[in-house]
Image (tube, rainbow, N blue to C red):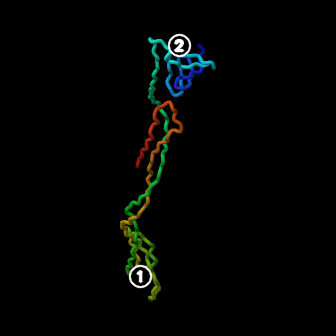
Amino acid sequence: MPDERRVVRTDGCAGFVVATHGDRSELHFDGEPPLLVPSQSLVPDPDGGFRLDLDARSADETVVVPLVAEQVTVGKRTVETGVRLVKTVTERDVTVDEPLRRDKIEVHRVPINRLVETAPPARQEGDTLIFSLVEEVLVVEKRLMLREEVHLVTQRETVHEPQTVTLRREEATVELIEPQNVSPESGTPPASTRSGDNA
């Protein structure tokens, strides 16, 4: 019996004979599982096809209907994901209080009123710098008289001048990059994960 021949059932549904297994023929109808029937149930038609007549089978023969079931296969594979590091800069104000040294000069005028031959040079006594001031006075003879001394006293003091400065700190945020293409061979694509790190 040739294969791939048209066959019509008694209900008018058309199909094809796709294979013959000994005294049985395998029939395929659209939207239905394969049907295995005795070959003698196929009655030839004038157009070259067959008509399925299940009443023509012998009493001891049965119609075999194969049943199929779908199975799912779950697999997993490793995919590479990218990581994007985002760096941000934050600002904060802090108060800085550092001791500063400042020199202050006090002027002390010390009267002398003593005759001298020449003007005394400037001299240093400790933290005091001394300059001599002279003037000419009219006497029986003209001589120099030390009128006074100017004492410059250096005093040191420590003061605090608080100032506000701006400090910067960097913070990083980690973002996962989803893979562009995921093969259909794997199961469910991996879920993306987002994590953050605050410095």
Is 134 in front, or is 184? 184
Amino acid type, mark 2: Gln
Q: Which residue is mark 1?
A: 147
Mark number displayed over residue 40: 2
Depicted 8 relative to depicted 119: above or below: above
Question: In screen coordinates, is 46 left or right of 110?
Answer: right
Amino acid type, mark 1: Arg
Depicted 74 relative to depicted 97: above or below: above
Sort mark 1 into few (<14), some (14-19) or many (20+) by Cα contacts within 10 Å: some
Name the image quarter holding residue 28: top right
Depicted 57 relative to depicted 75: above or below: above
User: Spatial distance from mark 1 to mark 2, Cα to Cα?
Assistant: 155 Å
Mark number displayed over residue 82: none
**Residue 165 picture location, percent across and down:** 43, 61
Query: Which quarter shows the N terminus?
Result: top right
Is 2 in front, or is 116? 2
Name the image quarter holding residue 12: top right
**Residue 103 picture location, percent across and down:** 40, 68
Seen at 47% across and 17% down, the residue is 63
Q: Secondary structure at mark 2?
A: helix
Q: Secondary structure at mark 1?
A: strand
Seen at 41% across and 82% down, the residue is 147
Seen at 39% across and 74% down, the residue is 106
**Residue 29 picture location, percent across and down:** 53, 24
